[in-house]
């Protein structure tokens, strides 16, 4: 489930991964992708991998009204880094002071300019205050230093290292909030997120619940691409997919357009 949310059962009647898998197999005729569909054993035998590829394709080619979500994080006094995952991009960041309830939107700044402005290293030595800015830092080391740790870097005299990920840098993103707060604050992040991954048979996400046919067609596209090696079939399925995805996008734009100015509408159309 998305970060910050407690898993809940799928809505009554909603489809899950196991349902999508069966639909894909029945529509494509590739019964080898489950253990024994003829014998009513729909256990995965390669279909889940193709569904995963389909989800990534949909993420890259669509934005819908459930792509945007809020994430709530807590920063204690002196902390400056907020860890995130499955984020496509961050749109806006707000801070709520827990002691007073005061809510302020933070301004986005270029990461290099912001670190130059707050130049002390490491981050933990920065003077705390009232956060005013946020930025998306680079959180990983280059390939030649992939085996380094914070301890080995500090031994060599490098101090600006306390916002890096060392063991699994490619799995996470995050934002810097500066200056670090001088009291506990909540950070409310509005972002556009990747689809929730499907692994257990009971898993569900936006596509299985709201647009199962699109997910099935996207998986059929992966079958045409990876199993059939048939570019003509891929293009035919993709043409229909793009038409349906555009309709979803139009629905989102129509909903968000209510009450907006002409300039705001032009910006919305660029999403």
Image: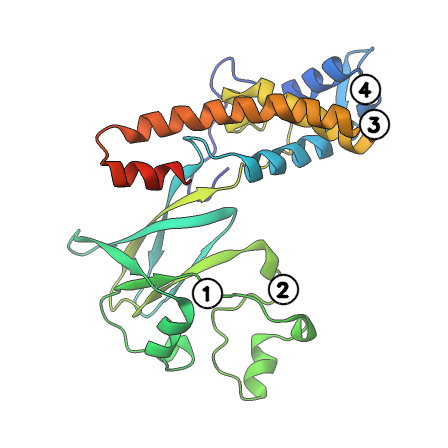
Q: Is residue 244 above or below residue 98?
A: above
Q: Which mark, residue 71?
A: none
Asked whether disc 2 touches disc 3, contact meaning CB atoms under 8 Å apart, the reply is no
- Rendered view: 171 above or below 70: below
**Residue at image mark 4:** 30
Compare marks 4 and 1 and give the one earlier in the sequence.
4
Residue marked by disc 3: 228
Give the residue at x 64% y 31%.
200
* Residue 118 visible in the current orientation: no
Residue 205 visible in the picture: yes
Q: Of label 2 and label 3, which has the lower sequence position?
A: 2
Asked where in the image residue 268 lies, by quadrant, the reply is top left
Which of the numbered marks, if any, corresponds to residue 137?
A: 1
Q: Secondary structure at mark 4?
A: loop
- Report the Cα–Cα distance between label 2 and label 1: 17 Å
- Alpha carbons under labels 3 and 1: distance apart: 42 Å
Residue 247 place in picture, x, y as percent? 47, 22
Q: Secondary structure at mark 3?
A: helix
Query: Mark 2 highlights which residue?
Result: 167
Crowd tier of the residue under label 4, counting other residues whose Cα lies within 10 Å: few below 14, some 14–19, many 20 or above: some
Alpha carbon distance from label 4 to label 2:
39 Å
Name the residue nearer the viewer: 76 or 122: 122
Residue at (69, 75) in percent of width and height? 144
Separation of marks 4 and 3 at Cα, in angstroms = 11 Å
């Amino acid at each position: 489930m998305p970060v910050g949310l407690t898993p809940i059962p799928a809505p009554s009647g909603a489809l899950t991964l196991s349902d999508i898998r069966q639909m894909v197999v029945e529509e494509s005729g590739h019964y080898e992708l489950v253990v024994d569909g003829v014998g009513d054993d729909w256990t995965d035998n390669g279909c889940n991998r193709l569904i995963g590829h389909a989800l990534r394709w949909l993420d890259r080619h669509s934005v819908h009204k459930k792509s945007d979500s809020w994430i709530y994080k807590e920063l204690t006094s002196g902390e400056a880094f907020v860890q995130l995952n499955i984020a496509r991009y961050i749109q806006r960041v707000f801070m709520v002071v827990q002691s007073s309830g005061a809510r302020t939107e933070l301004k986005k700044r270029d990461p290099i300019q912001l670190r130059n402005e707050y130049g002390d290293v490491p981050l933990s030595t920065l003077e705390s205050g009232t956060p005013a800015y946020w930025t998306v830092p680079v959180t990983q080391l280059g390939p030649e230093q992939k085996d380094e740790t914070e301890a080995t870097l500090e031994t060599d005299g490098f101090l600006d290292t306390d916002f890096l990920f060392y063991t699994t840098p490619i799995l996470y993103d995050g934002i810097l909030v500066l200056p670090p707060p001088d009291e506990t604050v909540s950070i409310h992040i509005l972002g556009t997120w990747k689809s929730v991954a499907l692994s257990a048979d009971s898993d569900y996400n936006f596509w299985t619940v709201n647009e199962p046919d699109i997910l099935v067609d996207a998986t059929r596209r992966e079958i045409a691409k990876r199993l059939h090696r048939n570019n003509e079939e891929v293009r035919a399925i993709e043409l229909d997919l793009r038409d349906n995805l555009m309709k979803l996008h139009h629905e989102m734009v129509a909903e968000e357009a209510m009450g907006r100015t002409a300039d705001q509408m032009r910006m919305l159309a660029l999403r």
